[in-house]
Amino acid sequence: MGGVIVECNPVFRLYVRSYTSRLRFFIGLSDYNFLEMDSARITTGGKYECLLFDMDDTLYPMSSGLNLACRKNIQDYMLERLHIEESEVPKMCLDLYKEYGTTMAGLKALGYEFDNDEFHAYVHGTLPYDNLKPDPVLRNLLLSMPQPKIIFTNADQAHAMQVLNRLGLEDCFEGIICFETLNPPKQADPTESIPLSNDSDSTENGCFCPKSPILCKPFVEAMKAAIRIANVDPKKTIFLDDSAPNIASGKAAGLNTVIVGRSDLVPGADHALGSIHNIKEALPEIWDVEGDQQQVIQSPAVATMVLA
Ligand SMILES: [Mg+2]
């Protein structure tokens, strides 16, 4: 294969000389094929080599109203499309979310059959995306980080792209691991080796819970799949998420963890950030690099990254 020219942010470009190995991303596409992008694992000489970011309620505050609107849409879907008894919907929605990471994964575990795309279109189609505004402060923070940054979200690709575009962050990440990445349709099956979530039926809390065919956070299998897909060393990777269960399983998978949206630590969290905007004060070591790498930063030589 010929060389692939990858445009990237200026600071990232200047680290090109310190690349040591390939990093492969799989991004779910709307046609359910998978695009394999060439990139590379970066070696900054610092403590961390990659950052995995949750998206919703991590890159923007929960006060935006998307979370609440999404929950209402899911409940409407359960009522109108799955014909679940109205009085049972709110508790069932919350219980499944807590048990399976997403209500969708829980509904599938219980045997409800519906189209994944239709579900996502229904619950995301009317979200108040206008509430999300470009965030130049966060954009500058992300672009100044020397490490590759990857989105790891349970949401589908369409929602991820909509959110990143609204926040003005669409070019701040080297990859997206989303619903379609971990849950390709059977016929595509490019990630056959990825295990299903909740592989053995759970008996936690004394209740029997059927396994879900959906792979998603907070299952440790999903964390391990993301680590494998991104081809990162979890010990040198920071995982940021607003969900305490996700942080706990991220830690179980060996990642460095940051709970976002609250100032107190949760089990498994190494750091707590009231806002993602506070990341430089809380984790200045992200920007720490060794002396020889600093010299690379000062070099004006590299304009684009070309991978043979
Ligand atoms: Mg979140």
Image: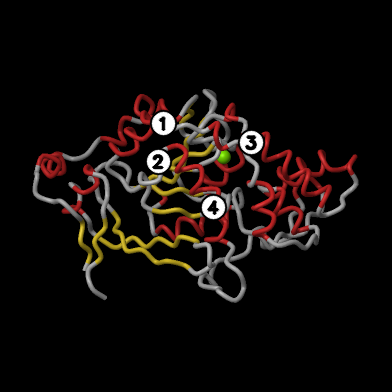
> What crowding class fits label 4: few (fewer than 14 Cα within 10 Å), some (14-19), or many (20 or more)?
some
Which residue type carries mark 4?
Ala
Q: Does the residue labelled 4 lie within 8 Å of ligand 1?
A: no
Q: Give how far apart the Cα atoms at labels 4 and 2 are.
A: 15 Å
Q: Give how far apart the Cα atoms at labels 4 and 3 are.
A: 16 Å
Please say if the residues under marks 1 and 4 sit with CB atoms less than 8 Å apart. no
Closer to viewer: mark 4 or mark 3: 4
Does label 2 or label 3 sit earlier along the sequence? 3
Q: Where is residue 308 in the image (x, y as percent from the top left)?
A: 21, 69
> What crowding class fits label 2: few (fewer than 14 Cα within 10 Å), some (14-19), or many (20 or more)?
many
Please say if the residues under marks 2 and 1 sit with CB atoms less than 8 Å apart. yes
Residue matched to label 4: 158
Examine the rendered structure and indicate whether residue 245 appears above or below residue 265. below
Instruction: Tell me, for residue 135, which label it has, or none.
Output: 1
Q: Where is residue 110 in the image (x, y as percent from the top left)?
A: 80, 58
Element type at mark 4? helix
Element type at mark 1? loop
